[in-house]
Amino acid sequence: MKEIHEFLLCPTPDVWIEQALQHPEILLIDHANCEKKAAGTALNLMYRYVDDFELLNKMSRLAREELRHFEQVIAIMQARGIEYQQITASRYAAELRKPVRTHEPARLIDTMIVGAIIEARSCERFEKLAPHLDEELQKFYLSLLKSEARHYQDYLTLAQKAANKGAAENVAIDDRIALFLQRDKELVESSDDEFRFHSGA
């Protein structure tokens, strides 16, 4: 977790924790949605980049893990009598992705960086929220930290690999990482009208 705290530019504001505790059903519903979307993103990348065996293997594993997490969340919801309703998505992911370039390999590099940041932010929120939850949810959220941290590392590794392709040495991607991290900070610290797992303050 130390690496993730050092990677992100800011912690989740305490006011978001307060909102999460006030909206426990929305928290679980949107958490389920996030896991489902993460699996879908990994599968889409497998269809788009079929010539990269490392990417295919990492995204296949990630998709399976995210779907397993989805199953765990909806099982908790079912046990607690929480109906799985359709709710609007937060603006976080869409806004975070806006600077993604449209030509290759820049598109792949940026997409991997965005994936890394989303996984890192999710991991940070699970850890920060866990101590405030009941024993079942606390145990569940803490159990997610290891896989989310690995997903963050996998995405960053793939971003660097895409940048290095055809180059004799490491190609710097720090400026792109900094750009998306700043965007994450702005989204996390700004206000949102509705509470969601990735909403702002």
Image: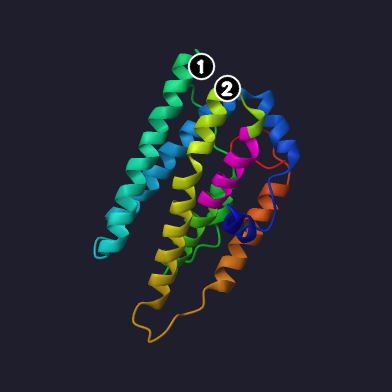
Camera-side residue: 85 or 184? 184
Q: Is residue 87 visible?
A: no
Neighbourhood count class around disc 2 (C-alpha, 10 Å): few under 14, some 14–19, many 20 upward = some
Residue span colored magenta: 119-130
Chosen colour scheme? rainbow
In the rendered image, residue 83 lying in the magenta stretch gets the answer no
The kind of secondary structure the magenta stretch mainly shows is helix
Camera-side residue: 167 or 49? 167
Disc 2 residue type?
A: Glu
- The numbered disc on residue 179 is none
- The numbered disc on residue 82 is 1
Which quadrant holds residue 22? top right
Up-down: is 2 above or below 145? below
Could you tell me which residue is drawn at 47 percent across and 21 percent down?
76
Disc 1 residue type?
A: Ile
Per the image, label 1 sits on a secondary structure element best described as: loop
Q: Tell me if 104 is positioned left or right of 100 in this view.
A: left
Q: Disc count in the image?
A: 2
Neighbourhood count class around disc 1 (C-alpha, 10 Å): few under 14, some 14–19, many 20 upward = some
Tags 2 and 1 in contact by the CB under 8 Å rule? yes
Q: Position of residue 95 (x, y in %)?
A: 58, 52
Which quadrant holds residue 127? top right
User: Would you name the residue on which mark 2 appears?
Assistant: 25
Which quadrant holds residue 131? top right
Could you tell me which residue is drawn at 69 percent across and 49 percent down?
11
Q: Position of residue 10 (x, y in %)?
A: 70, 54
Camera-side residue: 69 or 25? 69
Q: Position of residue 36 (x, y in %)?
A: 41, 37
Q: Position of residue 64 (x, y in %)?
A: 32, 42
In the rendered image, residue 126 lying in the magenta stretch gets the answer yes
